[in-house]
Amino acid sequence: MIDDLKRLIDSRELLWAWTGRNIKARYQQSVLGWLWAILQPAAQVVIFTVIFTLFVPVNTGKTPYILFSYAALAPWAFLSSAIVDMSTSVVGNMSLVTKIYFPREVLPVSAMLARLMDLGVATGLLIVIMVYVKVPPYPLGWLFLPLVLITQILLVLGIGLASAAASVFYRDVQSVLSLVVQLWFYASPIIYPVSAVPERFRAPYFLNPMAGILEAYRDVLLYGRLPGTTFGVASAISVCVFLVGYWFFKRTEFVFADIV
Amino acid sequence: MPSESSFVERILKSLTRAQTDLAMTAVQFINVSKQYRLGVTRVSLPSMITDRIKRLRSPDIEHAAQAQRLWALQDVSFDLPPGECLALIGPNGAGKTTILRLLSNISKPSKGTVVTRGRMSALLELGAGFHPDLTGRENIYLNAAILGLRKQYVNRRFDEIVDFSGLEEFIDTPIKRYSSGMVVRLGFSVAACIQPDILLVDEVLAVGDAAFQQQCLSRIDQLVKSGTGIIFVSHNLYMVQAICTRALYLQHGRVQALGGVREAIDIYERDVHIQRALNAKHATQKETAGDGEVAITAVTVSGTSPTAEGGVLLSDAPATITVHYNSAIETGPVNASIFIKRSDGLTCCMIRTSSNGHRVFLRRGTGVLSVYLDRLQLITGSYEVHAYFLNESDSLPLTPTAARSEWFVVKGSTLGSPDNSGVYEPLAKWISE
């Protein structure tokens, strides 16, 4: 696996080129271009803010609901779009896969990187809201941001690589994924705070690595405190998911061209 | 001068090292086999349920999805030294593409080992990684990256690539606005401007115009001279002969012949002709049962030379083409047309009674019409004869389809160098003054 990673690093130029292709191709003939990276989570935030402050009030403490939900929605949008893009990345480029050899993980990984750029754009809006709401800055916590992001990326990579490979064998994977992502959204603390989850369900609740990751984002950005043990659990699970997903991908990649 | 001698020594050493490097093979296939699964390999849940129900009703019928297996390659061994061009020939489904896939590491052999040394480049499907929305320039970098090239390397050769493609004007246009020929040109330019150690070429030269093909061929020639090992797949045996020195003839995944390009092609063509003759026999049997009032029952080609052996005709000897027919009516004047076709379908010549000022009347019952050729004048290769009867004004065919002779082999007069190219051997006399 270390050899595989080395080979992937060797082909980083292809990785960048393919990522650039994904980004450029996505926004080539769209008027709004990269603004879509903001519009998608922003529209959701507006809806949720209207519902959960006016219709069904949700208690989010001192943090305004709009900031509370957007801090989780932006990373969530990255996760869901990246996983969906990754799962179709190999199947969608079969003509290439059956013709030329290159490390196959370039396809899903660059699909993820293209979505990571969207997260960067979406973060811009987050900063604007944070400044507007006057959240007290917490530089010590910001040191943890890369760690939280890397954990999330590993989780995304693990699921994305496995589903990219599995899609080659079974096209059901796409449908299953969209269903799972939909359910997963409600199983994660995005539109409601963790405090709304009954105490006795907390332990199984945090087996969902996204719960720990989203809480860590909020801790560091909004609440001015360091990530807790739930983030540790999420990291361990994410690393395992990544290793299993990558192993599965590498194990099956030479069969891709034979299956078609 | 000790320093100078050590310098010379160093150069000598590096030279010998380079030579041993060259002596190594670029590609080695050792007893390679590859198996594919055919048919229904995956079963969906709903079909499994309905299958179960069907089987409950009629248990004796086999409903199980049978995963058939096919050996795409069986026990294939060959090697390719640097600077050599090896052709893969054989009918569709013989395993040529499978070999290319194993070579480019896209899939793994089921048995045996594949060894490749050096940088590999593949001209399999030109522009396979192109994105229609990106410009020519962007696609050059993208395609080069897929082929494993560094950006700096492409920067240095960018002008050369664009030059070769002849698309300077359109380089910043999205390639979805290109014609298909332009896309192919761009693809070849990228792949060919790399200096690969091994180059795989799969039938790509069939696309593109004649000038472009010529450009590609001379580039391939240049690469061979600079030590690139090339594996060339094509159904155009004349192109294969022009480019390659050796050939591997495959059939049903097995090696039928491996050796000099001429010998391998001869064996391949002979097999093709046997197959075609079998098919043609079936076809003509059906056709002659048709309604035509005139039927050609046989077309034969015979040489008169005593050296002609085993159906081989000599180019510089006379030959006779004989048409046997069976007519239900007494006809007025007719035109008989005879075409000599080369194995790739090229019509080498047309012999017609009308153009030779000969009038033919077919009599009722069986009859024979022959044409005597003073010299066959064809180059080494295999040919067949097609014969027709038409009415006098050429407006109506009297025979429903062309009647074909069996395939016959012609040996050119230049026996020492059988790989003569062209179509015919004129009776030539040289004069120097």
Image (tube, rainbow, N blue to C red):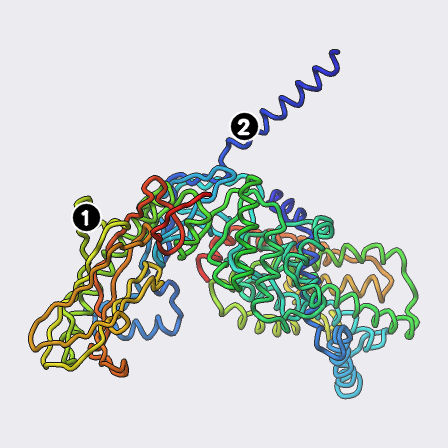
Residue occupied by mark 1: B305
Of the pair A151 and B377, the residue shown nearer to us: B377
Disc assigned to residue B20: 2
**Point 73% across, 69% down: residue:** A194
User: Residue A29 appears in which quarter of the rendering?
Assistant: bottom right
**Residue projecting furthest to the top:** B1
Q: Can you say whether B307 is above or below A166 in the image?
A: above
Residue density around tag 1, few if under 14, some if 14–19, many if 20 or more, within 10 Å: few
Q: Earlier in the sequence, mark 2 or mark 1?
A: 2
Q: Which of the two marks, 2 or 1, is nearer to us in this view?
A: 1
| Label 1: element kind | loop
Q: State the residue in front, A120 or A89.
A: A89
Q: Position of residue A131 (x, y in %)?
A: 91, 71
User: Where's residue A119, x and y in %?
Assistant: 76, 67
The three-letter amino acid code for the residue at tag 2 is Thr
Query: In the rendered view, does A208 fall on the left or right side of B43?
Result: right
Q: Where is residue B236 in the image (x, y as percent from the top left)?
A: 41, 57
Q: Which of B391 and B61 is in front in this view?
A: B391
Corner quadrant of residue B350: bottom left
Q: Marks 2 and 1: CB-CB under 8 Å?
A: no
Q: In which quarter of the image is residue A1?
A: top right
